[in-house]
Amino acid sequence: MQQQNTQQQSMMQQPPNVITSKDQLYLTDMLSWNLLAMKKAHFFAGQCQNQEIKQQLEKVGQMHNQHYQKILNHLQSQTTQQSSIGSQLQ
């Protein structure tokens, strides 16, 4: 019981404002995975003869493209915020 209380107290209320090198590597992997999935879906949609399957593959490719863009936009906004905070401190 006491261990459970300690775990609840030590939980972060919000994530830290820094991205560690491990976080950055994971985010880079996520970008790579989504880009590769998008390219594969586009390739296989081009090879497909069945229109229904082709449309579904194109939707899958669009979904991965949206995920890629969301991650990239989030990273760019974080970089902009961090650089503005850094310039304010100087």
Image: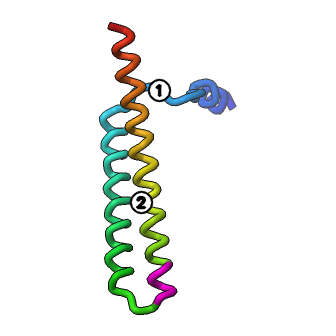
Q: Is residue 88 magenta?
A: no
Q: Is residue 18 left or right of residue 6?
A: left
Query: Of the numbered discs in the image, which one, if any, rests on residue 65?
Result: 2
Q: Which residue is found at the position 35% from the left and 52% from the top?
A: 31
Q: Report x, y in % for residue 55.
A: 48, 80
The image quadrant where one finds the C terminus is top left
Q: Residue at x 37, y 39 (%)?
A: 23
- From the viewer's perspective, tell me whether residue 66 is left or right of residue 13: left
Q: Are marks 2 and 1 in contact (CB under 8 Å)?
A: no
Which percent across, then down, holds residue 69?
42, 51
Task: Tell me: 90 left or right of 14.
Answer: left
- The type of residue carrying mark 2 is Asn
**How far apart, in angstroms, are the residues tagged by discs 2 and 1?**
27 Å
Residue 77 picture quarter = top left
Which of the numbered marks, if any, corresponds to residue 8? none
> Can you say whether 36 is above or below 6 in the image?
below
Q: Count the labels in the image.
A: 2
Residue 52 colored in magenta in the image: yes
Query: For numbered disc 2, what is the local secondary structure?
Result: helix
The amino acid marked with disc number 1 is Pro
Q: Residue at x 50, y 78 (%)?
A: 56
In depth, the one of 46 and 29 nearer the eye is 46
Dominant SS type (magenta): helix
Where is mark 1, residue-wise?
A: 16
**31 left or right, relative to 2:** left
Label 1 environment density (alpha carbons within 10 Å; few <14, some 14–19, many ≥20):
few
First of labels 2, 1 by sequence position: 1
| Image position of 79 with respect to 74: above or below | above
Q: Position of residue 53 (x, y in %)?
A: 48, 85
Mark 2 or mark 1, which is nearer to you? 2
Residue range highlighted in magenta: 51-55
